[in-house]
Amino acid sequence: MLHVTPLEQARNLPLWRRPISLLFLMAAAMPIAFATWSALLNNFVIEVAQFDGADIGWLHTVREIPGFFAIGVIALIMFIREQVLGVVSLILLGVATAVTAWFPSLGGILTITMLSSIGFHYYETVNQSLQLQWLPKDRAPQILGWLLAAGSAATLVAYGAIVLLWDALGLTYNIVYMMAGGVTALIALFCLLAYPQFEAPNPQVKKFVLRRRYWLYYAMQFMAGARRQIFTVFAGFMMVERFGFEVHEVTSLYLINLVANMVLAPVFGKIVARFGERRALVFEYAGLAVVFLLYGGIYWFGWGVLLASILYVVDHMFFALALALKTYFQKIADPGDIAPTAAVAFTINHIAAVFLPALLGYLWLVSPGAVFFLAAAMAGISLMLALLIPRHPEPGRETIFARGLPAPAE
C-alpha cells in the first residue's frame, strides 16, 4: 500500500525525499531522453529513413496527437494518483526512446514516436499540475527557473558526450538512444520506489473543467502551441537540410542552449517575480517575433549559417520565459482546478500542433521562409494577448477587463 504524506509533514523528511527534491529529479530525468531524441532526430530521419519536409511534418503531427488527448489525464487520475501517473509516464518515455533506432522506417518511426509522445505529454501534464500544487506562489517563479536549469544541467553531460565522442568512438544512433532512454527510465523507477505519495492540501477536481474566466489563459496556450511547433519542427530541420549540419554540430547548438538555460533560467524566474507575468511575456513575444522575421530573411535574402545559429540559440532562450504563463495561471486559479485545467490547457496547446506540422510541411516544400513569417505573425498575436494580463493577476482580476470584480464560479 502506498504511503501518503501531507505536504505540511513533508518538511520533516530528509531533504532528498521532499517534494521539491522529487520535482528536481524528474526535471533532470525527462530531458535526458527527450532532448537527446530531439538532438539526433533530424539527422536520424534524413540519413536512415530519407525523410523530406513533408515526412518530418507528419512525424511531428503524430508526435503531438497524445498532447491533444492530454485531457485523458482527468479520467486517469480518478483511478491513479497524479504522482504515480507522472512517474509511470516518464518510464514509458525512457523505454520508447531507448528502442527508437530499432525501427528505421517511416512506419516504425511514427509508431515508436507515438509511444514516446504518450509518455512525454502525460508526464508534462501531470508535472505541471504537481509543480503548481506543491510550490508556494511567492517562490514559484524562482523555483520554476531552477527546475529549468536542473533539466539543462542534466542534459549537458549527455550532449557533451555526443559532441566529444560521436566521431571519436564511432557512436551509433542505437547506442545513444538506448543509453539516454535507459537512464531516464531508471531514474523514473527510482522516483516511483523511493518517494512517498505527497498529498496537497487542496483536493483536485476530477472532472472536465472549462471556466470562462480562464479564457485568456486558454487563448495564450493555443497560440503558444501553434508558435512553438514551427520552431520545434522546422528550425532544427533547416540547420540540417539547408546548411548540412552533422550530428555533433546540431548537438553543439543544443549544448549552447543548455548552458544559456542553466545561467539564465533562474534569472528569468527572478525577473518574472520582480516585474510580473505581463511584462515578461510581452518581452518574450516581441523578441520571438523579431527572431522569426530574421529566420524568414535567411531564406528570402540568403543570409548565412552564422546568423541562423545565433537565432537558434536566442529563440530557445526566449522560450524559457514561458514559465510566466504557468505562474499567471497559478495566481488566477482556484486551487482545486489546477490538475483538470492542466490537462485541458495541454489539449488546447496541441490543437494546432496536430495539423500544423503536416500542413506547414507542404508549405515548406514551396517556401520555407513563409513558414517562419507565419510564426512571426503568431508571436505578434501572442504579444497582443499578453497585454491583456493585469499587473497583479488574481481570482477576479484575470484580465485588464475584470479589475476588482469577484471571481465567478464558471
Image (cartoon, grey):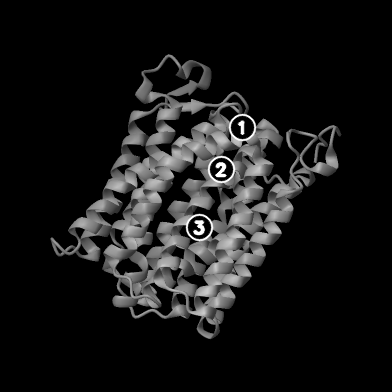
For residue 136, which quarter of the picture? top right
Residue 76 percent coordinates (x, y): 54, 45
Residue at position x 37%, y 41% in the image: 28
Asked if 89 appears above or below 197 in the picture, the reply is below
Asked which secondary structure carries label 3, the reply is helix
Write down the quadrant of residue 240 in the picture.
bottom left
Q: Which residue is mark 1?
A: 274
Hey, what amino acid is under mark 2? Leu
Front residue of this view, candidates 189 and 303 = 303
Q: Nearer the viewer, residue 187 or 44?
A: 44
- Which residue is tagged 2? 323
The type of residue carrying mark 3 is: Asp
Is 59 left or right of 275, judged from the image as shown?
Answer: left
Q: Quarter holding the C terminus?
A: top right
Q: Position of residue 106 (x, y in %)?
A: 38, 76
Q: Position of residue 220 (x, y in %)?
A: 67, 53
Give the mark nearer the N terminus: 1 vs 3: 1
Residue 348 visible in rendering:
no
Q: Which residue is mark 3?
A: 315
